[in-house]
Image (spheres, rainbow, N blue to C red):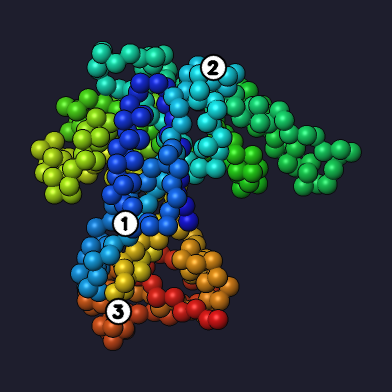
Amino acid sequence: MSLSIGIVGLPNVGKSTLFNALLKQQVALAANYPFATIEPNVGIAQVPDERLAILAKIVNTTTIKPATVEFYDIAGLVKGAAQGEGLGNKFLSHIRETSAICHVLRAFSDAGIIREGAVSPLQDLETIRMELQLADLATLEKQPEPKGGGKPSDKERWETIQHFKQRTGSGAMLTNLSEPESLVARELGLLSAKSEIFVLNVDENELSNAETLTKKFAAELHVEPRQIVIISAQIESELSSLSAEDQAAYLQDLGITKSGLQRLAEVAYKTLQLQSFLTAGELEVRAWTISQGTTAPDAAGVIHTDFTKHFIKANIVSYDDFVAGNGLKNAREQGKLRTEGRDYVMQEGDVVEFMIGK
């Protein structure tokens, strides 16, 4: 499945610098995705997974394909974007199909970079959210009322739309939706109903203080700490041009263990309640993205859509047992390999061999 994030923010908050770092990383990933056609406004980041290198050594392959996140960039939004101010409103349609929205907020102190409407992280967030809500209101206003009352399902949908209009018009984000409400929100591509991630672009010398800053901004923005990523967009730009070894050394000098892009990908994964299952063979070791609660046939369908229909069974061993047994053969001999059917719910870190019929 495709995990995609729409990046939004006011002008000059570091959004373009962050996105350009993603594009540089995308070039490095190109060998793994030879048939992928990526538009200029899309960048790809890997989801860090230390398990893959360990599996690769066991099965003797050099081809490693981590799960990935697609980031869609749009022009900087300004106040009044929903009414046609600036360019951002022209590109909002690009992120209607994304899984979540990533707010890039200015928290660095460089006075040499013009603020272009940026005041503070909280006020900037309120400005962006208001523009997203106004765009949603325009979408909701275009929905036609069912004629003659319509079918019960049409009436329920219309009532949901009226409820959305009331909430959005009062300045509220569309959170904590029921499943029927979520279906309508996804159908309409409502921006204010999407999960949110918050990137605070800070000065380089503040990166080592990320934990304290996360708590500070979580309280300030009234969001959960797990939704926040502290980065320095300038550092990310510099990291993206370095080799893996030089990146590790640079991060160590900064007193951090993972790049901001790596941490952003991890937060996106957790925010959207996703997990990975793993495949390991001589051709490649790969992490595949699925939603929590996905059954084995649907997980097989992520590899190839026909696999869901022709699914027979899945041979599964946990990552820990696979490593302890030094491979699938020993895990089977040790009784750690399980054969699961159509009702099996996939678990994080399952190493899988799907059996598919014709």
**Disc 3 secondary structure class:** helix
Rendered residue at 33%/13% (across/down): 114
46, 171: nearer the viewer: 46
Instruction: Report the side of 344 relative to 24 (left or right).
Output: right
In whole angstroms, how far apart are the C-alphas of marks 1 and 3? 28 Å
Residue under numbered circle 1: 31
Q: x, y (%) of residue 91?
A: 52, 31
Residue under numbered circle 2: 85
The amino acid marked with disc number 2 is: Glu
In whole angstroms, how far apart are the C-alphas of marks 3 and 2? 59 Å
Q: Residues within 10 Å of mark 2 (few under 14, many from 20)?
A: few
Q: x, y (%) of residue 197?
A: 41, 36
220, 286: nearer the viewer: 286
Rendered residue at 30%/37% (across/down): 21
Which of the two marks, 3 or 2, is nearer to us in this view? 2
The amino acid marked with disc number 1 is: Ala
In whole angstroms, how far apart are the C-alphas of marks 1 and 2? 40 Å
Q: Residues within 10 Å of mark 3 (few under 14, many from 20)?
A: many
Q: Quadrant of residue 353?
A: bottom left
The amino acid marked with disc number 3 is: Leu
